Amino acid sequence: MDFNTFADKAFKISREKGFDEAEIYYSRGGEFQLSSLKGEIDSYTDASSIEVYFRGLKNGKIGTAFSEILSEETATLLVEEAFENCSIASGEDVYIFHDGTGEYSSFEGYSGAFQKKTVKEKIDTVVSLEKVALEYDKKILMVPTCRSADTWSEVTIINTLGLNRRYKSDGGFAVVVSLAGDEKSKKTGFSFSLVRTPEELDVKRVAEEASKRAIDQLGAGNVKSGKYRVVFRNDVFGQLFGTFTSMYSADNVQRGLSVLKGKMGTVIGSSKLTVYDDPFLPESPYSKPFDDEGVPTCKKALVEKGELKTFLYDLRTAAKEGTNSTGNSVRGTYRSKPSIAPVNTVIRSGDLNLDELIETMGEGIFVTDLTGLHSGTNQVSGEFSLGASGFFVKEGKISNPIEQFTISSNILKVYNGIVEVGSDSVSSIYRVSSPSVLIDEIDVASE
Amino acid sequence: MHSDEAYSAVINRILSGGADFAEIFLEERYTGSINMVQGEVEGSVSGKLFGAGLRAFKGTRSIYAYTNELSFDGLMKVAERLRAVISQDRVADSVIDFRNEEFVDICPVLFSPNNVPKKEKVRVMQLAHEGASTFSATISQVIVNFIEYDQNVWIYNSEGVKAQDRRVRTRLAISAVATKDGQMESGFYGPGAAMGFEFFNMVDPRAAGERAARIADRMVRAEFAPAGRMPVIISNEFGGVIFHEACGHALETTGVAKGASVFAGKLGQKIANECVSAVDDPTIPNAWGSANVDDEGTPTRRNLLIEKGVLKSYMIDRLGGIKMKMKPTGSARRQDYTLAPTSRMSNTFLLPGEYYPEEIIAATDYGLYAKSLGGGSVMPSTGEFNFAVKEGYMIEKGRITRPVRGATLIGKGNEVLTKIDMVGNDLERGQGMCGSISGSIPADVGQPTVRVSELIVGGRN
């Protein structure tokens, strides 16, 4: 059954059932993944999938249901399931749909470059990724993870108010974890690269970076507990920052679940901190012209020179405050309701390169790895306590590797403690583009 | 569903490309979640997944593909793609004689998710909300989630395995936030089981809500935990996440088969203190991590992992077994058809020891009592783990004195196992979602109260 026939059918059943309005979100996509171990393809994934969501509105209440096949039977099931879901909805929130008005960017997220590559070429790339990582140094014992992947997707949103939008995007990534060892210890090093086309993947840089990071950590010692100045490496700061972006969600603010509640227009961080949500970031495969409710996306500052400029809204939370959606509704996984999040968080970079940043710090800790981001953070209070490893810095130079310590603080304390921002921005997982950042004081626990 | 002959033909198509092994995993799943905030239903989402995952082995290589196109032609098309990857000709045309895997269902279900009106589920959620919101005046927010699914799987492989299993899961997850003097702290409790709605004959939703609220309320009144090395007593039930992270993941083939685990090559060796014995048991009736057969169709079984400190077994899936030249242990699991299975934990716990929990506390002069733990993570190749203490107290002169918040525990799994020096007699299990390369799956953790002679506690100085 083709999509348009399916949508017509579902909308018809929806009217008969008694919904006021109806909307369908339809996504088709594919993924291709390879991993290499000891010079051979260790695993290979080649997949295609579809997802279809139906949302129905009745008296401002919403009901949602999903499926993975387009058929007449599915159309009936979706509407009925959504209707029961709608029937138990309570509370004062009023849901609305977007009518398709507004200015849509002509952003083009699809190049098709990965689709043009042969499987053989992709295999050669991932095998050489492992080879380069392994041959970087004799101390590299193995490369436990060496994976490359590319994905594409096409999203269509159509509703009974006249919205009818479609966009296609693609991209890829590579991840390498190298294991280094000597007589005394074993250490892993991690490197990740997000790309829009296969040509952008710098095999040598990614592979060598993972191995170098593992070797640099060998022989790591302890550090005395205390308060330290800290430089977070670019990708690590991006991870930490990204873990807490839920505090910009108007939904969390309205519910009192954000430390930013009541702080609009006030100073929440150092004047060195400027943060954007940029849905058109060229290098990000997450970039898109409209959000998952079909509302046009736009670039905006969340924080400008330390001042909180805006929260992020979807249609429902915006209506609650009499403002407009910022185009930040995210469907996420289809087993839960949509949330509100930045499309791509961009922390504006500064002038100092990493060496200069470390020199400015003088004495302190260079943090190159954080663990426990999904468990050791309290997104409501902003508190965190995380496992870390990195290097001790003395007299403005990296001195010795250190491991098995924790860093604890509050995210707003970190915002305020930013002394300098580096010039070495990198896009990493967590959809954050971040430079390395120098923070004036963080609690470190170990010995 | 198609006939056995049809599945045989799909498998043969894959084998004809030179594969040593081929498998079809079919899944149909109803899944639903209801979200309640401050007593109001804010979202209810439900639906169905349908898909097939096809897999082939050539030597120790694994090739995987999945699709939502479940017609015979759709499956054949995917089989063709797998065949093309290996692309060595082989004659494979004999009809596979499937042997049906028979078992007595260890997870029978009375009221399946589809047959209980959502209004009934909302009623349970309201009770949990009441339990939490009325617990203390500090409780400012309560979020209750009702999560359920009904998964049916069919597995066929080139060795004649044919298995079908049904996995029903029901979980109530409560988050409470307490606010006091501008501070906010949250508490979580999420009981679940391999049961339908009858789960709530066993679990009192109101008491579950109270428990989440208690954690938030205690913690908002707490000072920051002190930092440094100290003895840590970890309470029973969800405290077992320490074993799960510190050791369990490193006993899965994902790390062991590559030699990328601190416990690789250590079978029969002493890896833990003598008071430590541990099992992974997917055969506990109706437990959160149980199943009749694993996701490769192998019957599940209780696996003794550590006996009196000695490593007795790994958890092994089919591919891991080929790499390690060992037999599968019924431990292959996956989130759904979009991911190839690998060996995973099910219900994993430390076995009880001789001490009453009170005796362990009385025997400790100074340290941290970790009453509730949050999630954690581990790097299996180095054993480095971390996890969050969600409800903590100080122990001073053999007594629990004051609540402390914001503590994190870090260490190395192989070291911590040797530092467990007292094991209690109060074994309980708790429910969690475990994430690894084959996705997010329900898993029980568990333990009696244990003492670790020293761990690094990350807190404030």
Image (cartoon, helix red, strand yellow):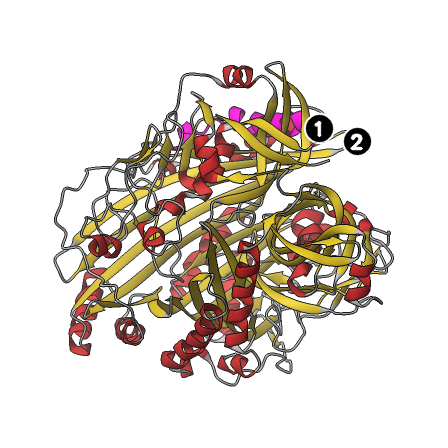
Is A209 located above or below residue B205 in the figure? above
Is B216 located above or below residue A116 in the figure? below
Residue B179 showing in the rendered view: yes
**Letter of the chain that mark 2 sits on in the rendering:** A
The residue that appears at 74% across and 61% down in the rendered structure is B327
The residue that appears at 47% across and 48% down in the rendered structure is A381
Which amino acid does the dot numbered 1 rest on? Leu
Q: CA distance from mark 1 to mark 2?
A: 8 Å
Region rendered in magenta: A196-224
Residue A184 — which label? 2
Residue A215 showing in the rendered view: no
**Picture coordinates of residue A10, whole percent (x, y):** 21, 69
Which SS does the magenta portion mostly show?
helix
Q: Secondary structure at mark 1?
A: loop
Mark 1 burial class by Cα count in 10 Å: few <14, some 14-19, many 20+:
many
- Depth check: give the residue in front, B284 or B292: B284
Residue at the disc numbered 1 = A218
- Depth check: give the residue in front, B286 or A250: A250
Left or right, B337 with respect to B290, comes to left
**Picture coordinates of residue A153, whole percent (x, y):** 33, 48
- Location of the N terminus of chain B by quadrant is bottom left
What is the total number of numbered labels drawn onto the structure image? 2
